[in-house]
């Protein structure tokens, strides 16, 4: 296009050309939103991995106090600490790069009064990471981190030599001019995309730390006494009591070893374990009717794996009048469920018993003395019995709760270290209600987001799925290998009371 001689028109044409160039460089809001979604998932994943690492470290500290594991724990705990120190250093360094990029993209909450910045700017990352020395320096520090992590112990090097999420290979790029590592990741990349990529590297080092710390923990946890079976030993002093009488629960574990005590809770409260390996707890029986006490035993098996067994104990509390109201399924009433009740007038027939409830609805069941209760709000529900021939009504209070959140799982695993082929063999994501006494209650996963990074995925991949199945992401899963980290986040599950958002789960493939 020839430029006109008239100055004003020439200026208008030049401005038009500049605007056209800017529009060509414009990045769509959908892409920016996608990067922000991935960045949020990565940060959530890092938080989950942090929690796992802290639990391993706390367990190692405890093992240093136990006679049978002290020597090994004293050897491996410092190695795990070294992995943490190395990771903290590189993680904080990457954070300083993110802060530098944000500042260059006009992120200044103190000045602007908000957290806005130039998300679609293509110049900042190029100038700082490619034309400057930050990209080369980041590559060197990541390479040094990987080398130092593997050098902590020969066993760690052997286990993770080719299986750490920190992948420094140059990813495939469309622009053949981007021949260096830093150019492949940061050349002409929007600010928000560069921040997401840096979050990916932070997640990679946190995941690497978690795997090494878990390995150190397992070197101690693998030394256990061997048993063939584990059987909960639970008994009560009585199964029928009158209101106000005392009841005692005894609980223990078959094949118990005096140097490795299990952890036992009775009705949600920790119970001390005696020298004979049994936990005992006394309490007063309150309220007539059928009651249930839940005993949960946590222990570590001979392979160093944490195990849990739960045993419900049912007993009956009698009443001088003989009238009673008992929950057939659980000791409390749950919102969103049809709670079956057994109601008895004692020495009078069912036709003379007139029950009512002050929280929700109560309807007659399909047999004498059987009722269905559907409470409307959490708290307490009082069921009142008016019995023909008795002047004073009897009131039976019940606790009302919401159904607890299920736990997201893939197969039987709720996250952590898993073999590549074991993960690939799974069909999707499920929502499991653990240790919930009320039988037949189900939650169904209706959507989730899957994020894959680490080995095999130098460029982070993620997809949103509107079902519980892996069918639509099978192509990504099949590309995974040892060293891949898979995060399943934004998990939605439908069930009693509506839709719930479940905690994310992270899998480290080996």
Image (cartoon, helix red, strand yellow):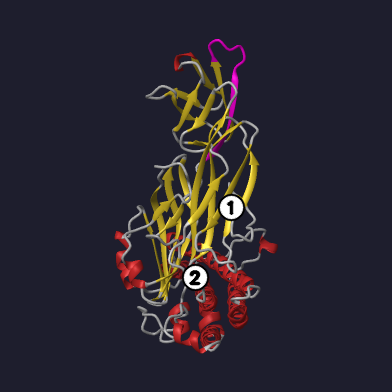
Q: Position of residue 147 (x, y in %)?
A: 52, 88
144 is within the stretch colored magenta: no
Q: Secondary structure at mark 2?
A: loop
Front residue of this view, candidates 383 and 209: 383
Q: Few, some or many C-alpha atoms within 10 Å of disc 1 (few <14, some 14-19, many ≥20)? A: some
Which residue is denoted by mark 1 in the rendering? 265
Q: Secondary structure at mark 1?
A: strand
Q: Quadrant of residue 170?
A: bottom left
Magenta region, main secondary structure:
strand
Front residue of this view, candidates 221 and 478: 221
Marked residue nearer the N-terminal end (2 or 1): 1
Q: Which residues are magenta?
A: 387-402
Residue for point 40% across, 45% down = 442
Q: Is residue 239 visible?
A: yes
Which residue is denoted by mark 2 in the rendering? 304
Q: Position of residue 386 (x, y in %)?
A: 55, 16
Q: Position of residue 389 (x, y in %)?
A: 55, 10
Q: Quadrant of residue 158?
A: bottom left
Residue for point 65% across, 42% down = 283
Front residue of this view, candidates 312 and 254: 254
- Tell me if 236 is positioned left or right of 61 in this view: left
Front residue of this view, candidates 496 and 475: 496
In the displayed structure, would residue 65 be above or below residue 246? below
Q: Position of residue 298 (x, y in %)?
A: 53, 59
Q: CA distance from mark 2 to mark 1?
A: 21 Å
């Amino acid at each position: 296009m020839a430029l006109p001689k008239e100055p004003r028109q020439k200026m208008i044409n030049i401005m038009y050309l500049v605007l056209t160039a800017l529009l060509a460089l414009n990045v769509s809001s959908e892409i920016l939103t996608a990067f922000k979604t991935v960045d949020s998932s990565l940060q959530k994943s890092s938080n989950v991995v942090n929690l796992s690492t802290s639990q391993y470290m706390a367990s190692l500290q405890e093992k240093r106090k136990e006679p049978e594991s002290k020597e090994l724990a004293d050897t491996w705990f410092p190695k795990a600490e070294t992995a943490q120190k190395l990771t903290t250093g590189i993680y904080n360094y990457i954070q300083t790069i993110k802060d530098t990029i944000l500042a260059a993209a006009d992120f200044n909450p103190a000045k602007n009064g908000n957290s806005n910045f130039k998300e679609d700017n293509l110049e900042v990352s190029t100038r700082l990471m490619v034309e400057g020395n930050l990209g080369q320096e980041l590559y060197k520090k990541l390479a040094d981190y990987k080398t130092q992590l593997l050098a902590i112990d020969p066993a760690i090097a052997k286990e993770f030599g080719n299986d750490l999420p920190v992948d420094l290979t140059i990813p495939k790029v469309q622009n053949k001019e981007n021949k260096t590592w830093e150019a492949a990741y940061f050349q002409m990349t929007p600010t928000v995309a560069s921040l997401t990529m840096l979050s990916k590297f932070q997640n990679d080092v946190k995941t690497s730390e978690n795997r090494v710390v878990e390995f150190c923990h397992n070197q101690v946890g693998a030394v256990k006494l061997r048993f063939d079976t584990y059987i909960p030993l639970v008994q009560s002093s009585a199964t029928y009591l009158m209101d106000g009488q005392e009841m005692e629960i005894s609980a223990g574990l078959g094949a118990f070893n005096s140097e490795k005590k299990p952890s036992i809770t009775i009705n949600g409260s920790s119970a001390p374990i005696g020298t004979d390996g049994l936990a005992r707890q006394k309490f007063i029986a309150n309220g007539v009717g059928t009651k249930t006490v839940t005993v949960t035993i946590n222990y570590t098996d001979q392979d160093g794996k944490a195990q849990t067994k739960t045993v419900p104990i049912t007993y009956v509390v009698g009443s001088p009048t003989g009238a009673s109201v008992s929950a057939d399924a659980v000791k409390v009433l749950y919102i969103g469920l049809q709670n079956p009740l057994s109601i008895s007038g004692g020495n009078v027939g069912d036709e003379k018993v007139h029950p009512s409830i002050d929280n929700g609805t109560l309807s007659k069941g399909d047999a004498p003395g059987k009722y269905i209760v559907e409470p409307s709000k959490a708290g307490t529900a009082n069921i009142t019995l008016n019995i023909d021939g008795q002047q004073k009504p009897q009131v039976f209070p019940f606790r009302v709760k919401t159904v607890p959140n299920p736990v997201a799982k893939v197969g039987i695993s709720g996250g952590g270290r898993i073999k590549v082929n074991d993960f690939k063999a799974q069909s999707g994501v499920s929502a499991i209600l653990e240790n919930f006494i009320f039988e037949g209650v189900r939650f169904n996963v209706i959507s989730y987001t899957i994020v894959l990074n680490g080995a095999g995925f130098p460029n982070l991949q993620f997809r949103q799925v509107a079902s519980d199945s892996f069918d639509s992401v099978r192509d990504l899963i099949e590309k995974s290998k040892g060293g891949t980290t898979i995060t399943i986040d934004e998990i939605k599950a439908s069930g009693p009371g509506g839709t719930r958002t479940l905690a994310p789960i992270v899998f480290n493939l080996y």
